[in-house]
Amino acid sequence: MRKKGIGLLLCLCFLALAGGGQRNNSGQQGNPEDEESEEVQIGVTFDSFVTERWQRDRDLFVSAAKELGAEVNVQNANGDMEEQIAQIDYFVQKKMDVIVVVQVASDENLDGLVAAIGRAKRAGIPVMAYDRLVLNADVDLYISFDNKQVGRLMAEHMREHLKDGGDILQICGPTSDYNVPQVMSGFAEVLEGSNLNIKLTEYAEGWQGEAGFSVTSSYLGARSAPAGIMGGNDDIAGQAIRALSEHRLAGSVCVVGQDADLAACQSIVEGTQCMTVYKPVEKLARRAAELAVAMATDETCIVSAESMNDGTYEVPFERLEPIAVTKENMDEVITGKYHEESDIYLNVR
């Protein structure tokens, strides 16, 4: 196993990015009065925009990058790995300064994705893995939330809410998404030794929310209602609640999810979803934009104290903390900051 030098990327100097000088063609800092300025070019390839969360990430990242004087080329792979590989090669052809990858949640042709990232790096273009770590790819930086803690927060809420114990139905995202095993690990860790039992685990391929409905419906057709349902994200959790509603069980089963989607926040205040895990994507997107611009402009950097193993390499890792959200702390954490009060309480006030 090779260890990378991880002092390369976690940068402090952002004042210069807003107006302290632009790069010239040699990559060195120059005075904008002496030569024509050149914007930093960032290429971002997203898995898809099927879920609300990724649309928000896109908008926040582009806005933050523009504030820092960068231009962003956003591509949507629509859940197609081959398309994402082609987009990375397109960014290399266009000579982007930095490439940001939100990996397609698929295990199809992962070797091809790793090879495409390798071509970018050989062309001298640094690559950032955003939210999802690309395994064995030796990316220059990985930035995400503490996904194991996401699972812990879900399980901690269930342990507190379901003191009498019972069976848990677990409907996760695809295991090809590196975050999913991390969330599952944190969830199982907290449930260990409790009187809560994971009765069945299923996976939503491609993060298709409909799996929440189909899996829950099948479960209820064969067994009595579970005490709780762990949804891999709020879309899956919401579809599970729809199935519960058809059996007149909505609100009687503890359903948890993640992402703090508006529909989930509405369900929480209405009483049909117990909690969600809020991952402040505005912090993630802004920090990622700062680091992407710094990677392009060779700003002064410091050594990162943290790294994540991608299966082959130690990758510099910027970790952000998630927050558990329930009806009790909704207004403190979410209202007016992530969603508007009138939208959250649309159906209850």
Image (cartoon, rainbow, N blue to C red):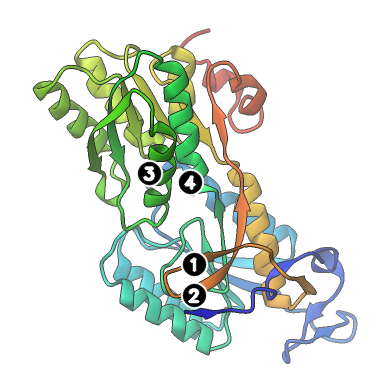
Instruction: Tell me what residue is drawn at x 35 percent, y 32 percent.
Output: 230
Residue 231: image tag: none
> Of label 2 and label 3, which has the lower sequence position?
3
Residue with the mark numbered 2: 313
What amino acid type is highlighted by mark number 4? Lys
Indicate left or right for 209 with 220 as reference.
Answer: right
Query: How many discs mark residues in the rendered view?
Result: 4
Task: Mark 1 and mark 2 in contact? Answer it, CB < 8 Å.
Answer: yes
What amino acid type is highlighted by mark number 2? Tyr
Q: Nearer the viewer, residue 155 or 27?
A: 155
- Cα–Cα span, label 2 and label 3: 23 Å
Image height check: is 340 above or below 31?
A: above
- Cα–Cα span, label 1 and label 2: 6 Å
Residue with the mark numbered 3: 184
Residue 309: image tag: 1
Indicate left or right for 146 with 258 as reference.
Answer: right
- Cα–Cα span, label 3 and label 4: 7 Å
Secondary structure at numbered mark 2: strand
What amino acid type is highlighted by mark number 1? Asn
> Of label 3 and label 4, which has the lower sequence position?
4
- Cα–Cα span, label 4 and label 2: 20 Å
What amino acid type is highlighted by mark number 3? Met
Instruction: Tell me what residue is drawn at x 13 percent, y 29 percent.
Output: 218
- Cα–Cα span, label 1 and label 3: 18 Å
- Asked if residue 260 shows in the view, the reply is no
Indicate left or right for 34 with 297 as reference.
Answer: right
> Of label 1 and label 4, which has the lower sequence position?
4
- Label 3 CA crowd tier, 10 Å (few <14, some 14–19, many 20+): many
> Of label 1 and label 3, which has the lower sequence position?
3
Residue with the mark numbered 4: 148
Task: Mark 3 and mark 4 in contact? Answer it, CB < 8 Å.
Answer: no
- Asked if residue 312 shows in the view, the reply is yes
